[in-house]
Every structure is written in structure tokens, then in C-alpha cells.
Image: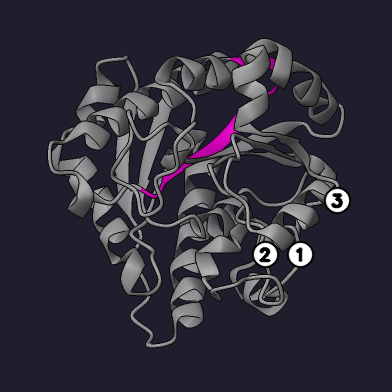
Amino acid sequence: MIFTLIEAPIATGTTQKGMALAPQRYREAGAAAALGVRGLDVRTVRVEPGQERDDLDAVAHGNSGLAAAVRRAADANSFPLVLGGACNVCLGSMAGLGAGRIGVVWLDAHGDFNTPETSQSGYFDGMPLAVLTGRCHQELRGRIGGEAVPEDRVLHIGARHLDPEEGENLHGSGILVVPAEEIRGTGIPASLRPALEKLEARVDAVYLHLDIDVLDPAFAPAVNFPTPGGLSLEDLEETVRLVSEVMPLRAASLTAYDPTRDEDGTTLRTAIRVMEMIAAGAAQSW
């Protein structure tokens, strides 16, 4: 199996700049070699981030290049794993996969479902899922390419910190939502399988978006917004395995690691392990 690591150091605003360093840190830590020992033919490509002064212009530039890289990998029958960067890499990732009934499995401590009208801070990277589903910034999504993803083709897993209006919008949308509290209460299979079966009936394959802060800070403390009560590594491994058993994975992204906050390397080691989980899931469903 060919596996393409796509380095996408795309981040916006001063609070995000640390995340732009993540792809380089993964490379220095030997991420490609770690996946290669699993028998994968690993390729690495880099997407140059936009240098525009305006954050949204930079997002459009970086994600347009990312879409092209994902498209090239998919056309070469290679599995694209996008290494962010911030969560807005979902826009280029899905644009690169093109048309078809491709769903989204979104793992994140946060909703990423704010809009300019509901956001208390105006923070763009609290909005990527709303942009992806066509709720806001449609002109930006149009510049990157791709169609809005119907809400009923999205499953959000692991939320435990939502802004008030964002939470109302998320739970009132067509998105399937399995919060962290439900997972802790009933376990992975009981909480996820019903939602996955609903999603399976609506899509032919899925893009897996994994914000590393879906994990509890005990496993991934080096993030901008650590939130207690997250998934364990075992929970996450079981989740990725279950998703890939139910539906084929067509691409994935790993986001939100900030190396400048990772004093002892805990989150880096976790991230490499998460890549191995994704690789196993991709190989299982490819």
C-alpha cells in the first residue's frame, strides 16, 4: 500500500503559529520511518503555506495547494494523510477527494461549528466544519474548490467543549453527534456503531479528520485548548478500527499539535502512534 504524508503547515493568527511547526517536527521525529516499518510504501510531499497578509487569503492559498496534493495522491492510488497545521486543512483535503458520496468522520474536543454570527471571538479555526458544510464563508470554500458536504454525511465524535450558540446549531443540524460524555458512559461500540451504521447508508467512503485534542490532555497536552474528559489512546484506537471496519477510509488528517508546548515530547509520541492507528485503519479498508 502506498501512503502519502502531506505536510500542510497551514495556520492562521498568532495563536496558531505553533501548529504550523508540527509537520516539520513529525518529519524530524521519523514519522515516515515509523510507518514504513509497517510495510507501507511511504512518500512525503509538502504544501507551501500562503504568505498573504490576510488570514483567509492565506487559508485559500494553502488549501488550494493541499487540494492539488491530495488529488495527485488519490489519483496515484495512494492514501493521503494530511499533517496539519490547523483544522482548516479539512477544506483542501475534501476538495482534493472530489465529487462523490464521501462522508466526514470528525474527531475533536470542540465543535468547530461556529459561524461569524455565533463566534464569541471571531476565531476562524472555530469554524472549519461550518465552512465545510456550507454554513459560512462559502466564497472562501469556492476559491479552494469542492462542494459543501451535506450535514447528514458528517459524524462528529468526542465533543466536550462547545460555545452556547455553536452547541445549539450543532445539535440542531443534520450532523450525527456522539459527545465524549456518551462515549465515557457506554463505551465505544455501543455509542458509535448506531451512528456509523446511519452514516454508512448515506456515503460510499469517508474522510477521517482527527484533531489530536479529542484525546484527554493526559495523552496530548501540547494543544492550544486542552480540555479534560477526552478519549484515551485505547478509545481512539478502537474508534479508528471501528470506523474503518464499517466504511472505507479515503483520506485522513491529523491536526492541532503545537510543538512549542510539548516540553517532554509526550504529544509527539502520541501523534506518531495516532498515525500508526490511521495507517492500520486505512490498510484494513483500502
Label 3 belongs to which residue? 172
Mark 3 in CB contact with mark 1 (< 8 angstroms): no
Which mark, by number, is residue 134?
1
Mark 2 in CB contact with mark 1 (< 8 angstroms): yes
- Residue 245 inside the magenta-drawn segment: yes
Q: Is residue 263 visible?
A: yes
Where is residue 178? Give x, y as percent: 70, 31
Where is residue 74? Give x, y as percent: 54, 41
Query: What separation in Å lies between label 3 and label 2 (alpha carbons)?
Result: 16 Å
Quadrant showing the C terminus: top right
- Using the rendered view, name the quadrant where residue 177 is placed: top right
Judge depth for marks 3 and 2 and give the one in front: 3
Kindly state the secondary structure of the residue where label 3 is placed: loop
Amino acid tagged 3? Gly
Kindly state the secondary structure of the residue where label 2 is placed: helix
Label 2 belongs to which residue? 131
Of residues 130 and 166, the one drawn nearer to the viewer in this rendering: 166
Query: What separation in Å lies between label 2 and label 1 (alpha carbons)?
Result: 5 Å
Q: Badge 2: few (under 14), some or many (20 or more) residues near its Cα, within 10 Å?
A: many
Kindly state the secondary structure of the residue where label 1 is placed: loop
Quadrant showing the N terminus: top left
Give the residues drawn in magenta, as a range.
Answer: 242-256
Query: What separation in Å lies between label 3 and label 1 (alpha carbons)?
Result: 15 Å
Q: Badge 1: few (under 14), some or many (20 or more) residues near its Cα, within 10 Å?
A: some
Q: Earlier in the sequence, mark 3 or mark 1?
A: 1
Amino acid tagged 2? Val
